[in-house]
Image (cartoon, rainbow, N blue to C red):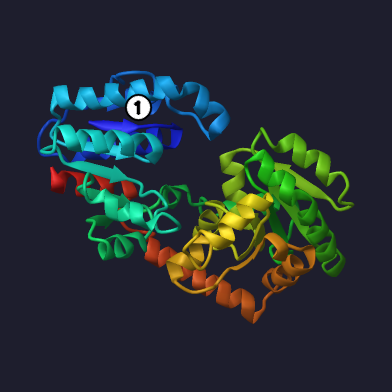
Amino acid sequence: MLVAGETSGDVLGAGLMDALVSLSPVPLRFSGVGGPEMEARGIQSIFPMSDIAVMGPREIIPRLPLIFRRIWQTVRHAVDQKPDIVVVIDSPEFTHMVAKRIAKRAPSIPIVDYVLPSVWAWRQGRARAMKRYIRRVLALLPFEPRFLKSVGVDCVYVGHPAIERLPEAGSGMRFRQARGITPDSPLLLVLPGSRINEVKHLIDVFGDVVRRIADEMPGLHIVIPAVSHVRPLIEAAVKEWDVTVEIIAGEDEKRAAFDAATAALAASGTVSLELALARVPMVIAYRAEVVVGWFALNVLKIPSVVLVNLILDRPSVQEFLHSRCTSENLAEGLLPLLSDTAARRQAIADLDEVRMRMGIGGESPNIRAAKAVLELL
């Protein structure tokens, strides 16, 4: 039985199903909750996944009665069907409520958690509590097993889906050739975020950074990958930048731009890991409302918000958060990464170490995850 709560979990679940079928020595039947990708592989979702795929208080609060009905419906399905194993996938606010209730009513059913909530960042007590209802965790990040072992939770590193989204070999060269950009010309990726609030907080300071660097490097090329819902906001902002900017769309173009880039200026988030796996030196920025900033500074239990630094367990990527997120600081951090300097060479060496720790070139995360589930089964 698989339980996914949103689109990203549906994709993970579908990949896991494919790998389980290919590796299992016996036929498998699937049941549970999933979206179109999992349904295409044989799950008849017991209700539409869209009922629970909501984010933020404005969406969640009106749907609370429905969400609680779906929690209990999922629990009853597990108790009635008695699956040999349950895998809950991401969406911890939903899936962990389901897992706790299944464990209480059917304690003989082993439960696997695919994608650890960020308990290592701020709710470390929650990790200890997971021992009561989770038999094994499938981790996306290589430092997570060590953390969970310290609180007595079984954990297997399987790898992050970003490993499967590496740029195609040669795509960066073709990207540059199509635009007449020579191999030695500096190309700066600017990634102000994929959420409207992120972009609003960062786009102006990023514009100041671009102007500062363009004054120092007349041949600089600027490329901004933008998802559709923030593109109008970005387009309006860059008109004031007084520099030539190309805005691109689509996953293939984005990956090719990563392969072509000299360095990147990015909002904090998973994109830092994608940049690292593509070997793009970067500087990370983040600004938010006062309350969010207070939370980040006073509640988080980690030395960095950049996944690269957490994986390496040292401060490799410079991060400028809240009051330190100024155009002066960001430009000063970026300039050495845009030419052949000792700082750039060290950054690339660090990113190669990240790739090694993430298991680039080994088995796919889907296969590793399936092996860990089948071993427990």
Quadrant for the N terminus in the image: top left
Residue picked out by circle 1: 34
Res 79 quadrant in image = top left
Residue, x 45% and y 28% (percent of image)?
A: 53
Nearer the observer, 173 or 377: 377
Residue, x 44% and y 72% (percent of image)?
A: 313
- Picture coordinates of residue 248, whole percent (x, y): 69, 42
Residue 279 sits above or below residue 30 on the image: below
Residue, x 38% and y 40% (percent of image)?
A: 92
- Picture coordinates of residue 89, whole percent (x, y): 34, 39
Helix, strand, or loop for circle 1? loop
- Picture coordinates of residue 225, whole percent (x, y): 66, 45
Q: Image check: 89 left or right of 242?
A: left
Residue 304 visible, this orientation: yes
Residue 319 sits above or below residue 289 on the image: below
Nearer the observer, 161 or 164: 161
The kind of residue tagged 1 is Gly
Nearer the observer, 83 or 150: 150
Residue, x 36% and y 59% (percent of image)?
A: 361
Res 184 quadrant in image = bottom right
Mark 1 surroundings: few (<14), some (14-19) or many (≥20) residues within 10 A: many
Res 51 quadrant in image = top left
Quadrant for the C terminus in the image: top left
Residue 15 visible, this orientation: no
Q: Image check: 55 left or right of 123?
A: right
The residue at the far bottom in this view is 342
Nearer the observer, 192 or 73: 73
- Picture coordinates of residue 60, whole percent (x, y): 50, 28
